[in-house]
Amino acid sequence: MNYLEEYYNNYNEDGRLLSRHGQVEYLTTMKYIRACLEGLSDPRVLEVGAGTGRYSVTLAKQGLNVTAVELIAHNLEILRAKLDGSEPITALQGNALDLSAFSDDAFDLTLLLGPMYHLYTKEHQLRALSEAVRVTKPGGHILVAYCMNDPTVVQYVFGLNHLHEVMELSMLTPDWRCISEPKDLFEMVRTEDIAALDAEMPVRRIRLVATDGASHYMKEQIDAMDDETFGKWLDYHFTICERQDLIGASHHTLDILQKL
């Protein structure tokens, strides 16, 4: 069993997006998924790294034709357990680095909402992104999620007092970039890293979105909000989530690309 399997076999992935502060990331991502699907009749959707199906199953239950690919068998079992057999979804075990099971230009929308969290070299990041672009139709959209570097420095390194630990383990560069290996589970990037990946693909960026914005900085306060206050928080978040001066401070971002 590798580090990633061990982590997801013991982690409540569903719960992450069900908490009130976690809903911000989920609702934001769904907002932009719907925008990309607007006006399409019978679109084909591929989710690579579908996890436990928070997005794939939701979209399939709304009647969309979905193919879900997930690396971790435990996650795939949970995803399939949510289905009653009536949903137009195909769930397969597979790897983001090799989508050879799918032909070129096959999907209207390709979601890559988890794999980039766990790819630690630019070579693998480019391969996953290239495969997602390849299987997407010209004019179709690719949505790619990333974990961001600086919120980790602020909250984990300083906020949780791990500075000396990460320095001893040489997990930071002199310019405060996080250095990750498979045992660390998550790869952190900056906005310029995302732009560098995009520059090597036949795509144009539609927008880069802060999917949770400031929500992870004030989880306890958000989880304690009443419905009215939370609604106002969402309104505020949606107003600022595309502001490029704030993107790098979000724990998670969503890169929305269109295939040329």
Image (cartoon, rainbow, N blue to C red):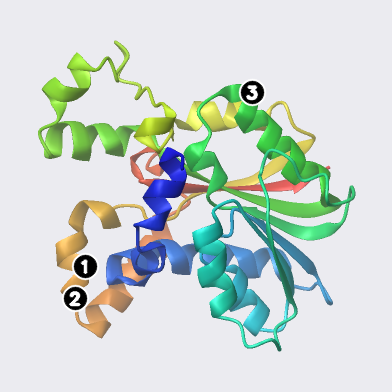
Q: Nearer the viewer, residue 178 or 90?
A: 90
Where residue 85 appears, x then y in whole percent?
69, 86
- Count residues near mark 2 (Cα–Cα under 10 Å), then give few for <14, some for 14-19, many for 20+: some
State the separation of the CA atoms marked 2 and 3.
43 Å
> Which of the numbered marks, if any, corresponds to residue 123?
3
Badge 3 marks a residue whose secondary structure is helix
Q: Residue 134 appears in which quarter of the rendering? A: top right
Q: Is residue 234 above or below residue 99?
A: below
* Residue positioned 27% across, 54% down in the render: 216
Which label lies toward us, 2 or 3?
A: 3
Q: Is residue 12 above or below residue 117?
A: below
Which label lies toward us, 3 or 1?
A: 3
Q: Which residue is mark 1?
A: 222
Q: Which residue is mark 2?
A: 225
The type of residue carrying mark 3 is Glu
* Residue positioned 34% across, 57% down in the render: 10
State the separation of the CA atoms marked 3 and 1.
38 Å
Q: Earlier in the sequence, mark 2 or mark 3?
A: 3
Question: In this rendering, would 92 be left or right of 115?
Answer: right
Q: Earlier in the sequence, mark 3 or mark 1?
A: 3
Q: Is residue 165 above or below residue 129?
A: above
